[in-house]
Image (tube, rainbow, N blue to C red):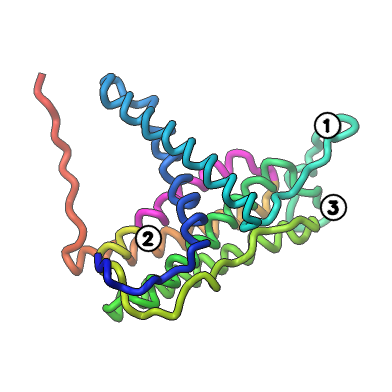
């Protein structure tokens, strides 16, 4: 890390970035806590979860008070109950129902995370030293932007707002504050987090066209993670994990 490097982002970006990585951290701790039986390890993850939740509340307050984030869609309270019919799952042709609340929430959240991811990977590609690393970052940026455009289109079809791009928050600096190894590892890790998020997306989805959209995005993410992982191994930046079993 080069502490003397010029700034790569405007101040506003750091708030969006903290929310981006905070959500990823919460998803890990949420899975880790039920798996832990050792009291000290379990308490550590509980501390991490609680600390991240407190940070998230501070971040959301800053984003809203300073007008740095678009107001999420407001869903009116239904006046009566409607039972689902077989056409409820349709999404490609015919009479397609509007998005329901959880579909809207996950589309909005996915866009919010991906516009931050797109900005970050664009900046990394701008300052990376190795040609192959820059090429991988460029592919990752294209994949992310394509996904964002598709998600935004689904919200616009229902006349709903979507978070805007943050690319303007990257400076013109080409002097990297970080090593290529660190930047590539970070993006592989965060793209892997997207795979975890898609499980939640598909679980609450009820339209076939959204399933197809998420499936395409997931396939693109797998391609990026594999290509980036191979590049890390070529440069001996990836260590083989060893499983150590304690004898009782």
Rendering quarter of residue 28: top left
The image shows residue 216 at horizontal and vertical percentages of 54, 60
Q: Which residues are magenta?
A: 187-206
Q: Is residue 127 above or below residue 44?
A: below
* Secondary structure type for disc 1: loop
Magenta stretch prevailing secondary structure: helix
Question: Residue visible at 45% across and 72% down?
Answer: 122
Q: Is residue 198 magenta?
A: yes
In this figure, which residue is indicated by the disc labeled 2? Answer: 187
Q: Earlier in the sequence, mark 1 or mark 3?
A: 1
Question: Residue visible at 20% across and 62% down?
Answer: 237
Residue 194 in sight here: no
In the drawing, does residue 148 fall left or right of residue 245? right
Q: CA distance from mark 1 to mark 3?
A: 16 Å
Tell me, yes or no, whether the two marked residues, 2 and 3, touch with CB atoms within 8 Å: no
In this figure, which residue is indicated by the disc labeled 3? Answer: 95
Which residue is at the front of the view, 68 or 227?
68
Q: Earlier in the sequence, mark 2 or mark 3?
A: 3
Question: Residue visible at 37% across and 34% down?
Answer: 48
Q: CA distance from mark 2 to mark 3?
A: 40 Å
Residue 24 in sight here: yes
Tell me, yes or no, whether the two marked residues, 1 and 3, touch with CB atoms within 8 Å: no
Which residue is at the front of the view, 125 or 146?
125
In this figure, which residue is indicated by the disc labeled 1? Answer: 83
**Dot 2: few (<14), some (14–19), or many (≥20) neighbours within 10 Å?**
many
């Amino acid at each position: 890390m080069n502490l003397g490097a010029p700034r790569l982002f405007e101040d506003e970006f750091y708030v969006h970035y903290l929310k981006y990585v905070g959500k990823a951290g919460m998803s890990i701790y949420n899975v880790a806590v039920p798996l832990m039986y050792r009291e000290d390890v379990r308490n550590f993850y509980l501390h991490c979860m609680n600390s991240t939740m407190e940070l998230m509340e501070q971040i959301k307050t800053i984003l809203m008070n300073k007008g740095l984030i678009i107001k999420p869609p407001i869903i009116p309270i239904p006046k009566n109950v409607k039972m689902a019919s077989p056409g409820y799952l349709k999404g490609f042709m015919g009479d397609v129902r509007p998005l329901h609340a959880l579909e809207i929430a996950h589309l909005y959240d996915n866009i919010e995370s991906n516009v931050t991811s797109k900005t970050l990977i664009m900046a990394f590609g701008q300052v990376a030293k190795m040609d192959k690393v820059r090429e991988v970052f460029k592919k990752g940026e294209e994949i992310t932007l394509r996904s964002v455009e598709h998600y935004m289109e689904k919200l616009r079809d229902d006349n709903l707002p979507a978070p805007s791009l943050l690319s303007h928050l990257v400076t013109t600096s080409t002097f990297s504050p970080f090593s290529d190894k660190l930047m590539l590892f970070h993006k592989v890790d965060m793209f892997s987090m997207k795979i975890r998020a898609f499980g939640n997306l598909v679980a609450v989805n009820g339209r076939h066209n959204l399933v197809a959209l998420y499936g395409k995005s997931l396939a693109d993410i797998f391609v990026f993670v594999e290509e980036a992982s191979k590049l890390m191994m070529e440069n001996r930046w990836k260590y083989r994990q060893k499983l150590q079993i304690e004898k009782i």
